[in-house]
Image (cartoon, rainbow, N blue to C red):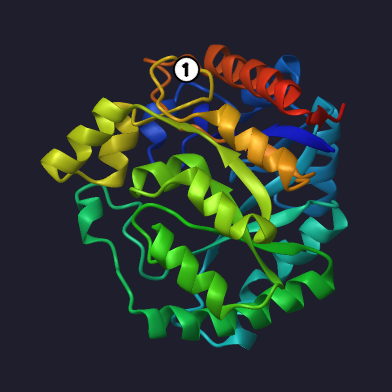
Amino acid sequence: MSVKIGISLIAWQNDDLPELTKDYTTEGAMQDAARIGYKGVERGRRMPADTDGLRAYLDTYGVVLCGGWCSGNLMVTTVAEEQAAIRQQVEQFAALNAPCIVYAECSNTIQGMLNTPVSQRPKLSRDEVLAYAAKLSEVAKWSADTGVTLSYHHHMGAMVQDAEDIDWLMEGSTDDLTLLYDTGHLHFAGADPVAVLDKWGHRVSHVHFKDVRQPVLDWVNAQDKSFLDGVAAGVYSVPGDPEGCIDFQAITDKLAKMNYHGWIVVEAEQDPAKAAPYEYSKIGFDHITDICGRSGLTIEG
């Protein structure tokens, strides 16, 4: 069993809170990630848009594309319209041998609204999610046939946020749709990350590792703050941070038992003035390397 370790550059380049990371460049982030030892990066908005340019850019730093965000709008579009909207990204990711597209429904999300409490996120009924899942299965099959797996990202502030939402999405979709498993978003949503992995591990194709500072999460909930309020206050951190509360060893043990062999991606958006990106990203890399070894997961590269 083997895994690959990648990173999202969001610690250096936060697109939702650009002022937070205005002093950091994408090039510097790429250099840092490669120097630490990460073998892949998820696509950022400030990377080259064209396929050849992006390939050359990745090659410059000796990393590969290990995924990338896709803002879905399937709740308000037809399947054909959604396919047309994301076709360029799907075809590009296929050409670059990316393992997946990180897809999330954004037509009704509040995740990027600084002044909207996360408690006001859209909560759909079971029937609504099941109907959405059936449509999304068609998009996922088309994407897979084109050469890229669609991996759904449950997210704070979105209509698929907690364990119940994930249950409905998985129950209503075919195996063409896979799940992105994000430890930090699950804990933030009040879910048990290990229990979700026990139930839906067979549908997981991509993994995001980030830890949670429980006192900050308690503050977000008590003061009815927004998701971005939480990010700016430091609700998230990297695996291996002693201020975190998630047991990542238990999770890598589970991943080993289910023969997971994909990417583990560090995605921990923080204020770089409080958590230096290079330092914390190295903490995350070193911790994942250690616990994977203890779980019997070989790290490729």
For the C terminus, give its image quadrant.
top right
Can residue 11 be seen?
A: yes
Q: Is residue 26 left or right of residue 75?
A: right
Q: How many marks?
A: 1
Element at label 1:
loop
**Label 1: how many residues lie within 10 Å, few (<14), some (14-19) or many (20+)?**
some
Q: Quadrant of residue 109?
A: bottom left
Q: Nearer the viewer, residue 264 or 62?
A: 264
Question: Is residue 47 something that shows in the picture?
Answer: no
The image shows residue 215 at horizontal and vertical percentages of: 25, 26
Image height of 253 relative to 239, above or below: below
Does 113 sit above or below residue 128? above
The residue carrying mark 1 is 241
Residue positioned 66% across, 15% down in the render? 286
Q: Quadrant of the N terminus?
A: top right
At label 1, the amino acid type is Asp
Where is residue 140 shown, x and y percent of the image?
68, 74
Which residue is painted at 65% across and 34% down in the image?
Answer: 252
Left-right relation of 145 to 291: right
Q: Residue, x 28% and y 52% (percent of image)?
A: 113
For residue 58, what is the image quadrant?
top right
Estimate the x, y position of residue 117 in percent, counting from the top left. Answer: 20, 51
